[in-house]
Image (cartoon, rainbow, N blue to C red):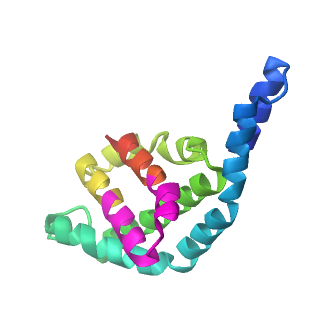
């Protein structure tokens, strides 16, 4: 649910008009609309480059994952790991677009930890992989400070969800 939808739902259930503070929050959100769209467009167009760099970073950090017997030892396993990076980038775009962590929670956090545990994926490695994805995204997109502030909290939220 978007920031605006949340305010409307809350105010409706409280049977009141939006407060000045809520309206100011909406104003600030709308001011960042063009930047949010730019970030999402860049993520979409540079997805393959980001994933390639993030994959390189995680396997440099954890070479044991691609060694014989590792979770990403074969071509198929490695491609599945990297496929998940694309999924996480899409989750990030949902957060950036809505200005809210709720879509990430509903779509991406619930049940994922259990799935990775059942597959024997080390949770510490998952945290490292999201950190690598974040670093690769910031490196490839070369964002200004205000854009970084709009995107980084969603990566950090996913990391906290894995902890």
The residue shown at (43%, 81%) is 49
Q: x, y percentage for residue 163?
A: 31, 40
The quarter holding residue 53 reads: bottom left
The residue shown at (37%, 78%) is 52
In the rendered view, tell whether residue 105 sits above or below residue 135: above
The residue shown at (48%, 51%) is 154
In the rendered view, tell whether residue 43 sits above or below residue 21: below
Q: x, y percentage for residue 107?
A: 57, 47
Judged left or right of residue 124, residue 95 is right
Judged left or right of residue 57, residue 160 is right
The quarter holding residue 100 reads: top right
Q: Is residue 1 visible?
A: no
Q: Which residues are magenta?
A: 131-152
Residue at the far top: name it. 14
Q: x, y percentage for residue 26?
A: 72, 44
Q: Main secondary structure of the magenta part?
A: helix
The residue shown at (74%, 42%) is 4
């Amino acid at each position: 649910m978007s920031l605006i939808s949340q305010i409307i739902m809350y105010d409706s259930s409280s049977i009141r008009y939006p407060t000045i503070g809520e309206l100011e929050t909406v104003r600030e959100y709308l001011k960042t609309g063009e930047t949010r769209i730019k970030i999402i467009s860049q993520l979409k167009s540079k997805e393959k480059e980001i994933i390639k760099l993030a994959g390189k970073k995680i396997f440099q950090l954890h070479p044991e994952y691609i060694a014989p017997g590792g979770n990403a030892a074969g071509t198929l396993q490695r491609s599945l790991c990297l496929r998940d990076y694309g999924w996480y980038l899409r989750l990030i775009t949902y957060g950036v677009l809505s200005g809210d962590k709720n879509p990430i929670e509903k779509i991406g956090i619930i049940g994922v930890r259990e799935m990775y545990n059942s597959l024997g994926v080390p949770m510490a490695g998952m945290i490292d992989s999201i950190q690598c994805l974040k670093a690769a995204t910031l490196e490839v997109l070369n964002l200004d400070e205000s854009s970084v502030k709009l995107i980084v909290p969603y990566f950090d939220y996913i990391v906290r969800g894995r902890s």
